[in-house]
Image (tube, rainbow, N blue to C red):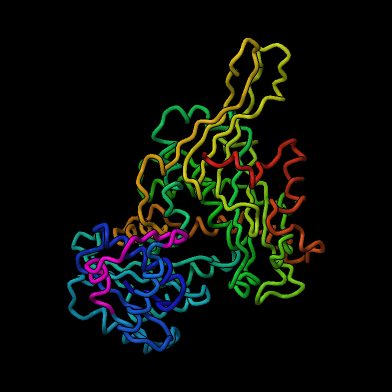
Amino acid sequence: MVIFGAGGDLTKRLLVPALYNLAHTGLLPEHFELIGVDMADLDADRWRDSLHAMLESFVGNAASESRIDKIDAATWQHLTGAITYIRGDLNDDGLYERLAQHIERPSPTGGNCLFYLAVADRFFGPVTAHLGKAGLLEEHWDPDGTKPERWRHLVIEKPFGHDRASARELNATILRNAEEHQIYRIDHFLGKETVQNIMALRFANGMFEPIWNRDRIDHVQITVAETVGVESRGRFYEKTGALRDMVPNHVFQLLAMVAMEPPAGFNARAVRSRKSDVFAAMRTVAPECAVRGQYGPAPNGAPGYRQEKDVAPDSGTETYVAMQVAIDNWRWAGVPFYLRTGKRMSRRVTEIAIRFKPAPQAPFEATNVAALPPNWLLLQIQPDEGIALQFEVKRPGPVVDLAAVRMAFKYADWFPKEPNVGYETLIYDVMMGDQTLFNRADMVEETWRVVSAVLEDWEARKPEDFPSYAAGSDGPAEADMLLERSGRAWRPVADTNSALR
């Protein structure tokens, strides 16, 4: 496994802990070699020591996603026993010549190689082109041409382009040097167990399919809220913003899981084709169906976005996005999907809330159907992973009175908490050649097409009301108006009842 950007934060905090967890559970190949590529002045021993020090900082740290109790010496030896560090400039042909000499030597790995681009997105195209020029992406196939005897896989992080045109250009560059079956456009949201469980919930339980459509569902809300600000990512965020950072990838992936048709099987071709159908059916979002916002200072004194490091004092970059999306197909025609994501909000939560249409008649005296609390199905991705269903029951007593109650399933109540940073499943799938949880070229381009009109409008008009929401709130008031014009309302982000308790 070759990691470009070996000294970076992604490598230390997520990739190496994920590899350690794979090794600890016996899922790392018996013959494994880790190669780091970076400009930093390091050698193999110093790189290994820096990775070990970072892993040690996670031990016993409840706030860490890795949840490592202790570092097992045998597991660490398996992971880093054959470790190499190659220093060089990513634009230097000589770097790839040295890398090729190292990889092509006789090795128990059999020549199989995973290239992971944990670098800034401006290097995705150049690194791929250099790998292709050096012959490092060439595979050897069996005589029948059915499977590679020596595979070469390429993992590309987000953001994959900044709009539809740049995504097309990047796809063209990469596909000139590698085949589609070699490319793994990664989205770490899809590595979360609760995201993958959406398909299990829908397609392994016959009770849901009859009501999973426009006849019974009123609308869907998808919320990805964070309590943190941009922290040290000001320079990156100024160029990117909340829409590019979150919507075409993370949020749309959640939407596709909810909206896709049943696949013919749980394989890459079937699942990705059904998700691609959803993206193709999504209407390009009109600017009037989208709202942007930027957090200001909090009442407790926390800085606003414009006071963050590396942020312009008059910045027009959005830290919050809400939009209404329409899917023009038979299942979802007329059902609005409301999406929102933001930083410095009142609570950290990723939730899919499906609201069902009310009963057509309530046969109870003096009961107004419209006044009854709605039926919700809640799929919580983080932090309280699980599923909840809200429905009506009769309150005990001689008077017929209805009350809303909730049945809830929590992952933590049924399954042991395993060390997991969200990358384990994805890295393992890349090694196994399973592209089910990764995007195809056409899927990426379609998601950018959906938000293209909004991006163009926002770039042409600088917002005049920024900052538009206080840090620690649920977002700008304009986002509420997005739903109010159709008589709907957002579920409160900070509502403790929305947690699976």
Between 183 and 391, the one lying in front of the other is 391
Q: Nearer the viewer, residue 432 or 6?
A: 6
For residue 409, above or below residue 46: above
Q: In this view, does 333 lie to the left or right of 419?
A: right
Is 166 a magenta residue?
no
Q: Is residue 80 left or right of residue 167?
A: left
Q: Percent x, y for residue 306?
A: 72, 70
Is residue 70 inside the magenta stretch? yes
In the rendered view, does 15 fall on the left or right side of 385?
A: left
Of 4 and 57, the residue lying toward us: 57
Residue 331: x, y in percent? 55, 35
Q: Is residue 419 visible?
A: yes
Residue drawn at the location 63% of the way across and 64% of the way down: 229
Q: Is residue 274 above or below residue 438?
A: above
Question: Which of the 4 image quarters holds residue 155?
Answer: bottom left
Q: Is 275 drawn above or below residue 156 in the view shown?
A: above
Where residue 364 appears, x then y in whole percent? 67, 12
Q: Give the range drawn in magenta.
A: 61-83
**Residue appearing at x 54%, y 57% in the figure:** 249
At horizontal 43% and vertical 68% (from top left) the residue drawn is 13
- Residue furthest to the right in view is 464
Q: Where is residue 95 in the image (x, y as percent from the top left)?
A: 37, 86
In which quarter of the view is residue 23 placed? bottom left
The answer to whether residue 80 is above or below residue 442 is: below
Dominant SS of magenta comes to loop
Instruction: Answer yes or no: is residue 295 visible.
Output: no
